Amino acid sequence: MHKLEIILSNSSHKPIYEQITSQIKAMIMSGELKPSDALPSMRALAKSLHISVITAQHAYEDLSRDGFIETVAGKGTFVSAQNKDFLREENLRLIEEKLEEVVETGKMAGIELSQLIEILTLFYKGD
């Protein structure tokens, strides 16, 4: 059983179940959680985080729906054996969200697209 290091914030604008979901997704996408790793039961997760079992269930349902985890009756909940295309798509989605924020900030500040591209290029090349 993998010990999940999840940090919940009362000051976050995200609901608790979303905080759990996004942190578990990040652990899976980074490789910290590997395919077929066992996760705590909903009750155990709820107890360790001092949250409602319903909140833990909501997080696990979202993770299951999105293909990150699977529950096997009588055996427990495990990280799904995902393919690289799935992880790539999820990473692209996250990048698009962040770039959308950057573009909005750039537009509000009157920064030209060419400047944004130049900055992105510098970051990507590591200069």
Image (spheres, rainbow, N blue to C red):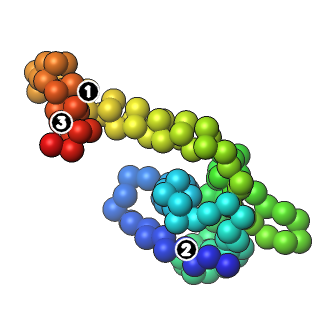
Q: Nearer the viewer, mark 2 or mark 3?
A: 3
Q: CA distance from mark 3 to mark 1?
A: 16 Å
| Residue with the mark numbered 1 | 103
Q: Quadrant of the C terminus?
A: top left
Q: Is residue 26 above or below residue 84?
A: below
Residue drawn at (54%, 39%) of the image? 88
Q: Alpha-carbon neighbours of circle 2 within 10 Å: few (<14), some, or many (≥20)?
A: some
- Amino acid at pointer 1: Val
Q: Position of residue 46 (x, y in %)?
A: 62, 74
**What is the crowding at mark 3: few (fewer than 14 residues within 10 Å), some, or many (at least 20)?**
few
User: Element type at marker 2?
Assistant: loop
Residue behind mark 2: 4
Disc sitting over residue 122 in the figure: 3
Measured along the vertical axis of the image, is residue 92 above or below residue 10? above
**Secondary structure beneath label 1:** helix
Q: Earlier along the polypeptide chain: callout 2 or callout 3? A: 2
Residue 90, above or below 111: below
Q: Give coordinates of residue 99: x percent, y percent.
A: 32, 32
For the residue labelled by badge 3, is the local secondary structure a helix, a strand or a loop?
helix
How far apart are the alpha carbons under marks 2 and 3? 35 Å
Residue at horizontal 66 percent and vertical 45 percent from the top: 83
- Which of disc 2 and disc 1 is earlier in sequence? 2
Q: Which amino acid is tagged 2?
A: Leu
Of residues 23 and 47, the one nearer the viewer is: 23
Q: Residue at x 67, y 78 (%)?
A: 1
- The crowding category of the residue bearing disc 1, from other C-alpha atoms within 10 Å (few below 14, some 14 to 19, many at least 20), is some
